[in-house]
Amino acid sequence: MIFAAGLGTRLKPLTDTMPKALVRVGGQPLLWHVIMKLRDAGYERIVVNVHHFAQQIIDYLNQNDNFGLDIRISDESEQLLETGGGIKRALPLFDPTEPILIHNVDILSNLDFSSLHADAPLLVVSERKTKRYLQFDDEMRLVGWKNVETGEVKGCEGRSLAFSGIHVLHPSAFPLMNDWPARFPIMDFYLKVCADHPIRGYEATNLRLMDVGKLDTLQEAENFLKTL
């Protein structure tokens, strides 16, 4: 699943007339880069959620014949459902027995998707500088979250690692969403259930990753792409 529904406010004024997913880096939209990476890794079915300038994304995929893949749209035009609600809405579009790789549209990385083997929800993390860190115990099980600027902690403290915007939702977690509302952040869900259900971190070796969420990172992203 590719998260492409966001408003892209940090990329204004570009996103005043287009969705973040179609902002170009290296001559191609961000969405293209993620789709190509998934296709090259052998993925055949992709769900893209849409909200902001939704029709532009739908038209782009149609014009490119879905790049030869089974690409399905999860339409959030009426209401942006946040990350957790977006996944919950999209679940019927997936095989209920298979894990779902979830990828933010504005993330570029050298991550090897074939290394993501999960028997529980799996969060791709790394040691990099950020304001908010996930907390893990010695067995790389999620135990909490911390904002290092404000000192706010949810759950317990542990080893601090930065979330990549890439994660695997295991089928064992699907039923746990049943009682959640239509709109919620997925990280709230993970932090709520991690005490009773294992949510694991995967620290990818030699991970190189860039969040292309801000206007001033676009040129940097062009250079980053050349090094991947």
Image (tube, grey):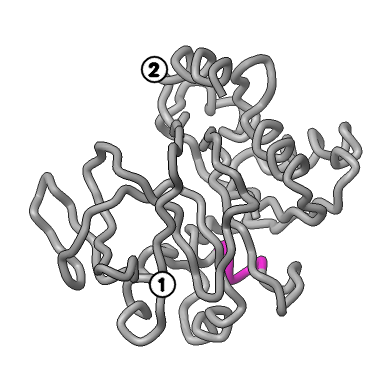
Which one is nearer the viewer's eye here, 8 or 106?
A: 106
Q: Quadrant of residue 135?
A: bottom left
Q: In the rendered structure, find residue 118 and report the number of the disc placed on it.
A: none
Q: Residue at x 46, y 26 (%)?
A: 11
Q: Nearer the viewer, residue 6 or 93?
A: 93
Give above or below for 75 relative to 157: above
Quarter of image, res 184: bottom left
16 vs 78: above or below: above
Residue marked by disc 1: 199
Q: Secondary structure at mark 2?
A: helix
The range drawn in magenta is: 86-90
The number of discs equals 2
Identify the residue at image location x=53%, y=27%.
Answer: 16
Residue type at the position of mark 1: Ile
Majority secondary structure in the magenta region: helix
Q: Residues within 10 Å of mark 1 (few under 14, many from 20)?
A: many
